[in-house]
Amino acid sequence: GLAIGSAVAGGGHHDRMDYPDPFPNDTRYRETLAEQFSSVSPENQTKWAYVHPARDEYNFGPADDIVEFARENRQMVRGNALLWHSQNPSWLEDGNFTPAELREILKDHIQTVVGHYKGKVDHWDVANEVFDDEANLRFQENIWLRELGMGVIADAFRWAHEADPRATLFINDFNTEGKNAKSDAYYELVRTLLEDDVPVHGFGVQGHLSIEYGFPGDMRENLQRFADLGLEVAVTEMDVRMVLDDSGEPTEAQLEQQAEYYRMALEACMAVESCTSFTVWSFTDKYSWVPVVFEGEGAATLMSETFTRRPAFGELRAAL
Ligand code: XIL
């Protein structure tokens, strides 16, 4: 019953908008994605900047292609993200809208996008990264929190639920795999939302880990406490990066350690009954965001640029 997913590359990295096409036209990539995974997550194609390029314009083509691919291959789909501080279009961020207009814009966006994918996108990351690493709500960076206050989180879930009552609605973030101040803040927020009958159904931990920082040893306990609130839990964007030496290649020891991290995360998920999906944030370095965003780091995925399987791939297969 556990879905094993991957991000589907495309839509452009921060400073690498030169991708050949929004869903790489790469036979090897597509075949592996179809063969090895039972869930897919558009990596960028359902984000505001891509799907909603102008106030009165929606661009569903790139995400539609992925959803169609998933239908053909009987895969589930996770959508990310409806309320986020990042990858928003400049028409929105620089638009000087009034709070009333912003509410209208957000409601329209959520209902249009979730409505378009009704019955096709199974999980939505409705609220993404609303807390920073100090466990404070991002009242500065996040336009919605800044202009509309924290009540907008509940509104976003309600609007999404109206648009597709059967979609599973998640709140999602990184550095929340183990118990810490940030995951504690989520725990309190989710408890309050549930008390208010807000349709929040899942807690997603992204799982962007690094072998430099250690594995969050209490991951299972952390997932379990959210499960005990009645939520589904999921690992939504797993990758395990490392600092590469001058050769640019990982050492065997690094890859062994990485394999262990992947396995421990999967085992934490499998030990929690309502952990329903485990997604990696790309399965090959060929399309990994890591080297683009984390300078000097890489080799974070299950396969090299040329699709050579790393020890982590075998560890996951063995653990399943
Ligand atoms: C990343 C993508 O992988 C990159 O291609 C893009 O340039 C930036 O966003 N948290 C999330 C994901 O929820 O949407 C992010 O994806 C990674 C961090």
Image (cartoon, rainbow, N blue to C red):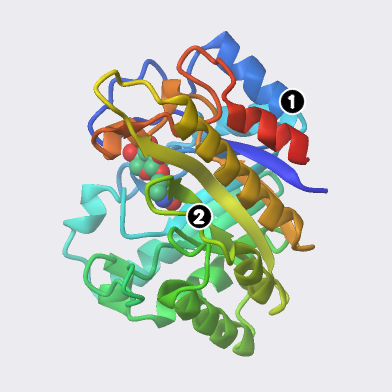
Residue 30 in the image: state x and y as whole percent.
60, 18
Q: Nearer the viewer, mark 2 or mark 1?
A: 2
2 or 1: tag closer to the N-terminus: 1
Of residues 8 and 269, the one drawn nearer to the viewer in this rendering:
269
Mark 2 nearby-residue class (10 Å; few <14, some 14–19, many ≥20): many
Picture residue at 24% right of the left edge, 36% below the top: 295
Residue 153 in the image: state x and y as whole percent.
45, 74
Picture residue at 56% right of the left edge, 15% below the top: 308
Left or right, 42 with respect to 75, comes to left
Of residues 252 and 62, the one drawn nearer to the viewer in this rendering:
252
Q: In the rendered structure, find residue 204 and report the number of the disc placed on it.
A: none
Numbered-mark total: 2
Displayed-image quarter of ligand 1: top left
As displayed, is residue 152 above or below residue 120? below
Picture residue at 57% right of the left edge, 24% below the top: 310
Residue 225 in the image: state x and y as whole percent.
65, 76
Left or right, 49 with respect to 69, comes to left
Mark 2 CB lies closer than 8 A to ligand 1 = no
Alpha carbons under labels 2 and 1: distance apart: 36 Å
Q: In the rendered structure, find residue 72 and report the number of the disc placed on it.
A: 1
**Regarding mark 1 in the picture, which secondary structure is present there?**
helix
- Identify the residue under disc 2: 215
Picture residue at 27% right of the left edge, 48% below the top: 89
User: Which quadrant would residue 108 be assigned to in this image?
Assistant: bottom left
Residue 23 in the image: state x and y as whole percent.
49, 23
Amino acid type of the residue tagged 2 in the rendering: Phe
**Regarding mark 2 in the picture, which secondary structure is present there?**
loop
Of residues 129 and 48, the one drawn nearer to the viewer in this rendering:
129
